[in-house]
Amino acid sequence: MCGITGFNWEDKNLIKHMNSSLIHRGPDGQGIYTNKNISLGHRRLAIIDLSNAGKQPMCNEDETIWITFNGEIYNHRDLRKILESKGHRFKSNTDTEVIIHGYEEWGEKVLEKLNGQFAFAIYNNNSKTLFLARDRIGIKPLYYYYNDNKFIFASEIKAILQHDIKREINKQAANDFINLRYMPSNETLFKNIYKINPGEFLTLKDNKLTKSLFWQLSYPKQEQIKPIKIKELLEDSIKKRLVADVPVGAYLSGGIDSAAIVAIAAKLKKEPIKTFTVGFDANNEVDELSKARIIANHCNTDHKEITIKESVSNLLPKLLWHLDIPHGDPVIIPQYKLSQEAVKKVKVVLSGEGADELFGGYVQYQTMLKGNKIKNILSPILKTAARLTPIKIFDKLYDYPSSIGSKGKEKIVDFLSHLKKTNQAYYDLISITSENDRKNLLKTNNFTKEITNNPIWQKNTDLITKMTSIDSTNWLQNYVLHINDRMTMTNSIEGRVPFLDHRLIELSRTIPAKQKINKQTKAILRQAIKPLLPKNVTKTKKQAFFMPLDKWYKEELKDMAKQLFTERNVKQRNIYNHYQLQKIWRDYNKSKLIYGKQLFTIINLELWQRMFIDNDTKKELNLKQIL
């Protein structure tokens, strides 16, 4: 995995500065290519062909086509054979060179032939064309700035910020972030900086930018399949992702997704696979460490347990710097600690992201199915019943790590009120704010309609397919995979996600809802991996990863919030209502689960603004410098 940079004019010093900001993505080397029309940069994390032949930017034989590439192409050897049969000659064993020759042979159609995770830019000196592309589901990031005929791109926004561009916060994106903990559109929190969408390619020629899709989710006819088809395809995906010229390991939680990957990888590898699990030094009911230990022993892995004891507040600025945009989930902390330890033994890790979206693993899917059965009951009756229902009853219905509290109950009332509007009801479930919060906490009621007005809701398909499609095109790419990429790359380690092989994604689209969710979530996946794991593992309910947010709140976050959100500062930001902000920590004990999420999200947004907007910094800042 690597870092890529570039812009549409020549400046050797500036491209070097962009490269330097991404040294964590590629500590093994760097390179640049410039001419009067282009500057391309690259930071290398050597995984395949560790020789100097893999150095980038890389060119074809006559140096007319240049590429800077981040990612891995898992079928590059098969494509190489095809290209060699057509007369192409190679000087390295890299997948990068396969893309160059594939582009020469097939043009943009090469994208359809690639199996992998990728983001790259190709410059054609003959046609003076810049071509950029991102993988089908958005595993690898790619951002761009386009204004006043200046086009700048990079793997991370901090590299784009090495240019002296105006930094302004996108307030609609900020509202979306506070509500959803991510931005669901191609916009970012910075005005004029955008994401290239998954499955999209951009072409810049004569200062004209065009966008096209080479892949998107399909809606084929659904037919029951045998679970073994999933097992066989997952095995092939893992086999491909174990190929590297450096050591490969795997993250292991107590859940079935990572357990399936570890069980298969353990059978494919001759020596015990190195596995890594993280937990907190606190008493909790959801003990990831002990669950993972059972799986590690069953699969005979070389297992490492990491226990987190340190302060969260001092770590947040570092993580925000590497994330580029704030993140509302404290899971960034254990993810960072995992990669920090894993890199001491391996350079590549496999992990289980994507299985929930493919096979229906989230608790909200079951909630929506239950709601769908009662949606014809008059809304006022449902709302009244919900308001009169004790919170303890709701706690038994919802398998959360702590009580949903009064704020959670308020969100349930919202959900029941909108059951006849499926899109709005789902929005109520996945947001961390209630309808009242959106009216009272935020200064403006300006949100993207990417979720509620998504054309997916109009598709002639079942509710599970609609919800998993919404999550695959929003939550997965902008939330789950963003964490995976940044928290691995922070410590210069490559993350690979076997469930997101596009063949598995496409197979999952053909599976009927009743095979995905019946009495359990991910039912067909559980059946597929049943022969590989202990019975108590395959029957385990999906549970949220335990985070000691309440402990952090009492020891650190409450005081930090009061320091950050003075009345004067809140007024200057013009995003929140100060009285409502105070209500969060004043009423915190009434709804720890929801208020804890809101508080962590808002604190991260404020720290991010102080680092990236107020300070105009081009380097990482610590907590003391921010406060």
Image (cartoon, helix red, strand yellow):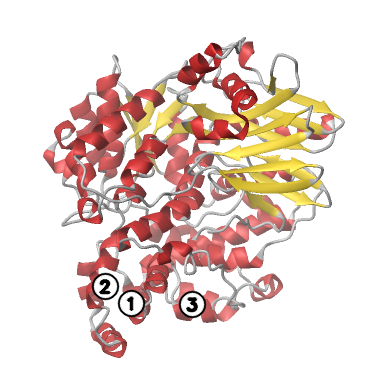
Badge 3 local density, few (<14 within 10 Å), some, or many (20+)?
some
Q: Which residue is mark 2?
A: 371
Q: Residue at x 26, y 37 (%)?
A: 230
Quadrant location, the N terminus: top right
Query: Does 61 sit above or below residue 222?
Result: above
- Residue extending furthest front? 86
Mark found first going from the N terminus, 1 or 2: 2
Query: Does 580 sit above or below residue 521?
Result: below
Q: Amino acid at mark 2?
A: Gly
For mark 3, give the secondary structure: helix
Q: In the image, residue 16 lies at what x, y percent?
A: 77, 30
Which residue is at the front of the view, 410 or 224?
224
For mark 2, give the secondary structure: helix
Q: Which residue is mark 1?
A: 419
Quadrant location, the C terminus: bottom right
Q: Which residue is mark 3?
A: 437
Direction from residue 46 to residue 406 in the image, left or right: left
Pointer 3 and pointer 2: residues touching (CB < 8 Å)?
Answer: no
Q: Which mark is residue 507?
A: none
State how far apart marks 1 and 2 are (Cα). Answer: 7 Å
State how far apart marks 1 and 3 are (Cα). Answer: 19 Å
